[in-house]
Amino acid sequence: MNIRARDIPPRAAWALEQAGTHPLLARLFAARGVQQPEEVDDDLALLPAPDALLGARAAGELLADALQQGLTIGIVADYDCDGATACATAWRGLRLLGAPLGWDRVRYLVPDRVRDGYGLTPTLAERVRAMGADILLTVDNGIASLDGVAHARALGMQVLITDHHLPLVVDGEVRLPTDAVIVNPNQPGCPFPSKALAGVGVMFYVLLALRAELRRRGVFGPRDQPRLDGLLPLVALGTVADVVRLDAHNRRLVAQGLRRIRAGALPPGMGALLAAAGRSAARATTFDLGFALAPRLNAAGRLSDMGLGIECLITDDPQRAHELARTLDGINRERRQVESAMREQALLSMAERHGADLDPDTAPPALTVFDPSFHEGVVGIVAARLKDRLHRPVFVFAAAQSDDGQPCLKGSGRSIPGFHLRDALDWIAKRQPGLLLRFGGHAMAAGCTLPADGLPAFEAALQAVARDWLDAATLQRQLDTDGPLPAEWRQVDTADLLDAQVWGQGFAPPLFSEEVEVLGQRLVGERHLSLRLRIGSDMIDGIWFGRTDPLPRQALLAYRIIADEWQGQRRLRCVVEGAAA
């Protein structure tokens, strides 16, 4: 592993500090590309107007007509956390804005990951129509569902697509659904300044556009209009969970959502999920959203029914919210067991094929694994775990059935920086026509469907493109850090200061690195290394999760800091993330 300290542009750090930013935060923000104080200002007034989003005004007009005419809106959600929060945001926001008109005719449907697959299909369109919907509204999906949209229109429904995924490209030409209102910052011609909006963020903007349209129609005025900021906790959760880039725009949305969560102004279901995870709403962080709430919601979509997750987010009954949160927590425990068994089986399978000492130094440039026992709903998270462990692009496949009922293999892949996974699949599809029945995704995550006998050909093709595209430097794991933590900031208050900020994809949480003296070490739980470290003149306890090999007396460690509470006392602790080779 190579540990590297980020450059800190001195002028940007100085400008931020002169504007009142804490000196440590000024350095951290500058190292992440922040140049002006406005970029870390979370004032909602700095958000772009909804009209900046192509199609948002037309969407507002369509929805306003529906509310005023008493039409029924059917929401087609997605089965991940972004889709669930987008659905809950749409459901709550539409009812809120429709209340002055006596309107509450909104229904939702969430597809089954295994039975229905991803996106709006003709079959799903028929189910939405059967619910009595006049308008079909997609959230976090739909931009590539050309057949589903066409079928919905043939059934007599108007269609509004809210999505953030990339449009379908056929022979180098973008193809969009026709005869539908589309709101997506990544559609051609959209001038919206942030292309990183999550699906829930797009839906939030559509609601802002609807409120503006209802104001223009005189349904309410600026002073008595319904407030939509109560939806921001949902927006924050979906944005963090979907691991979209936290640019300045998304950081504002997340910061405002966290502010309301910490103040107790959050849906009962989110509070219940935090309680089930043993987390405090008053101290909620982006880490809690991404690693406590999101997995419990995503587990429902992987192993059960995401309808449970959506109901948890839309109910206003605290007792029902806690019942659902306990159910989701139980499903997540089951997901962990399934994932652990699959991960161990995958490692065993790869060791048998590539050598028992498989590690980042010996692994081939890309890895593919399949076992008949694998669960289709968990292949993506297992691929992510293997990618993290071996620092290689990884595809994990499970047995499945195609849309026409034929046996096939469905796989999910995760990649490393420098290897664009969707482009790799496109390369394979062009050189081996018919091998990929379906594929899609982006740079770091993608999925595909193969014929039942297509795995050997796919593995050979993936290995070929990986050998061509990846070099030794790219295959070496690299940790970008913020260098040594100055002695004056090695304190609990610093950990609290850092926890109060918004960190995530594209705005990495602080990770410090320096030479330390290892004063003591022991295994805890047979899986983790407990450490006693001397950092400068300070002695600090640390933990390295998942590490069992002992460290030398002197080591260059990369670590983050947390405030640990024990017997009523709060103290600084290090969580080690890596050591230089």
Image (cartoon, grey):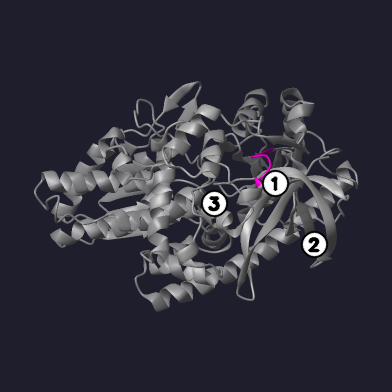
Give residue 396's mark. Answer: 1
Location of residue 3 with respect to 117 vertically, above or below: above
Q: Which residue is mark 2?
A: 527
For disc 1, the neighbor class at 10 Å (few under 14, some 14 to 19, many from 20) is: many
- Residue in the picture at 62% in, 49% down: 488
Q: Nearer the viewer, residue 13 or 421?
A: 13
Q: Which marked residue is nearer to the observer: mark 1 or mark 3?
A: 3
Q: Which marked residue is nearer to the observer: mark 2 or mark 1?
A: 2
Image location of residue 81, percent across then percent down: 49, 54
286 relative to 176 in the view: left or right:
right
Residue 480, quarter of picture: top right
314 relative to 396 in the view: left or right:
left
Q: Which residue is mark 3?
A: 498
Which element type, helix, strand or loop, lies under badge 1?
Answer: strand
Image location of residue 521, percent across then percent down: 84, 60
389 relative to 195 in the view: left or right:
right
Please state the extent of the stretch shown in magenta in the rendering: 480-486
Q: Which marked residue is nearer to the observer: mark 3 or mark 2?
A: 3
Tell me the quadrant of the picture where the C terminus can be found.
Answer: top right
